[in-house]
Amino acid sequence: MNIVRLVLGDQLNQNHSWFSSVNDDITYVMAEMRQETDYVKHHIQKVTAFFLAMRSFKEDLSSKGHNFLYYQLNDKNNPQDLEQIISNTIAETNADKFEYQLPDEYRLDQQLQQICSSLDIAHDHYDTEHFYTTRSELKDFYTGKKQMVMESFYRMMRKKHDMMVQNDQPEGGKWNYDQSNRNKWKGQPPIPKEKEFIKNVDEIIELIKNANVQTMGNIDSKSFAWPVTREECLSTLDYFCKQLLPHFGDYQDAMHDDEKFLFHSRLSFAMNAKILSPKEVIAAVLDHFYDTTTDINISQVEGFVRQILGWREYMRGVYWKEMPEYKQLNTLKNTNTLPNFFWTGNTKMNCLKKAIGQSLDASYAHHIQRLMVIGNFSLLTQIDPDEVDRWYLGVYIDAIEWVEITNTRGMSQFADGGIVATKPYVSSANYINKMSTYCGNCHYSHTHKIGEKACPFNSLYWNFLAEKKEHFKDNQRMNMMMALLNKMDGNKLAEIQERAAKIIENPDAF
């Protein structure tokens, strides 16, 4: 029986059971498609990384004897359309059966179901063998519960997978060390330089430009540094364990003018493209921890495990539970447009200049930069979540819809009305000053609420609470802030809202 198997660009799992043995009757098909480069405007580094990773995956498995049909973007025989690619490959190989791994994006899942319904040969689908959970596991876990609180899901996952648990109790005595993970980095301890894999990508850039693929952001084509091969990603994991893990947890929420990566692993692209599995990443971290417990506090390790075993699996579960309706949610009815500086980084607000500038230069920002600087500003200025989604999905090298939209539309923009987060993640400049060095080098004063030198976050924050108070009047987690709002002098609040209105009307002037 001749079989055609589709491998998508984020299904680069060399350890998948598909590849456990070589079968000459199986042809694997992969393609660099305009369908995938064009559904949103992506960062140039993101497109480059995926093409490089896909090609490396194909080369590694071809060298082991597997048959691959690979369409590069400029291949004259590349129809640039998934359905056509599948039907062409079936015809070329005289296939009797078509198989695919379940996609992690709803649009591709629907497309592949539609394609299969029109095939006149047998077809089947398989798990990607990547995640700890199935698509429906989170939905089943929360059935009958009032709220989908992540902490309860995380504890279940720790117990189920016997992760840092002894006799059903958490190792170290606490399930969650989040309170220990909020330190501001002030120059010490020293941060090891990130692990780089410098390569010239002129050929890829030329390919993308000649195809007229529209991208955003910047790239140094002579020194592209992201890990994209299996070997490079494993090396980055090893480097994280040995050099960065000892201080990861303490400073995972910190932000600094001169440091892009701090103690973060830079493994999210490798994991979201499935080059590395979450199981092997966590296993490497725990093995290193148990081998060197005198040097690494449990809070460093628990913070990392929580992000992968807890948050990452939780967000995927929410995605499959709530889609496709989730993509349309706009509970707060925000309709404003993104400022121009989201595409340039040109703003007098230093925190946004640094976080957005870094995103455009490196296709990277860590979770607090995304949530409490860029996302915070987007929500406070009441930007349409559709616009926010598109920007986040495009700009970050690790952004795939299943993980992007739940973090952005849910956690960051509260557009889902509280499915993911029990309160909106908004703050004044006080939080940004507490966790970063940004405010010390800013045009504005983080302590002033009104006046030309007052940080825009301060007036925007109180204006947001005032404008959206009907949405939050019954939200217990907002009671304290709403009480402070209600006690505020009316004239002062009016002055604050007047300044906020100017910022919202013309954000590029600030």
Image (cartoon, helix red, strand yellow):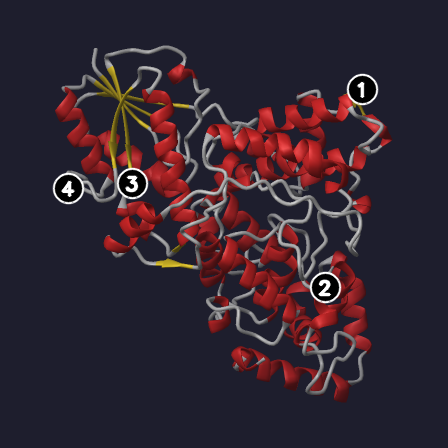
User: Tags 1 and 2 in contact by the CB under 8 Å rule?
Assistant: no
Task: Report if residue 339 is visible in the image.
Answer: no
Which residue is located at x 64 percent, y 86 percent? Answer: 498
In the depicted structure, whether residue 18 falls above or below residue 439? above
Tell me the quadrant of the picture where the C terminus can be found: bottom right
The residues bearing labels 4 and 2 have C-alpha atoms spaced at a distance of 51 Å
* Label 2 crowd bin: few (<14), some (14–19), many (20+), radius 10 Å: many
Nearest-to-viewer mark from 1 and 2: 2
Residue at mark 1? 166
User: Tags 1 and 3 in contact by the CB under 8 Å rule?
Assistant: no
Q: Is residue 150 left or right of residue 353?
A: right
Q: Amino acid at mark 1?
A: Gln
The residues bearing labels 1 and 3 have C-alpha atoms spaced at a distance of 47 Å
Q: Amino acid at mark 2?
A: Ile
Residue at mark 2? 432
Residue 284 spot, x, y in % from top left: 65, 25
Where residue 141 sits, quadrant-wise, is top right
Helix, strand or loop at label 1? It is strand
Residue at mark 4? 76
* Label 3 crowd bin: few (<14), some (14–19), many (20+), radius 10 Å: many
Answer with mark 1 or mark 3, whichever residue precedes in sequence: 3
Instruction: Compare residues 195 and 356 and report the one nearer the observer.
Output: 195
Q: Which mark is residue 32?
A: 3
Answer with mark 1 or mark 2, whichever residue precedes in sequence: 1
Answer with mark 4 or mark 1, whichever residue precedes in sequence: 4
Answer with mark 3 or mark 4, whichever residue precedes in sequence: 3
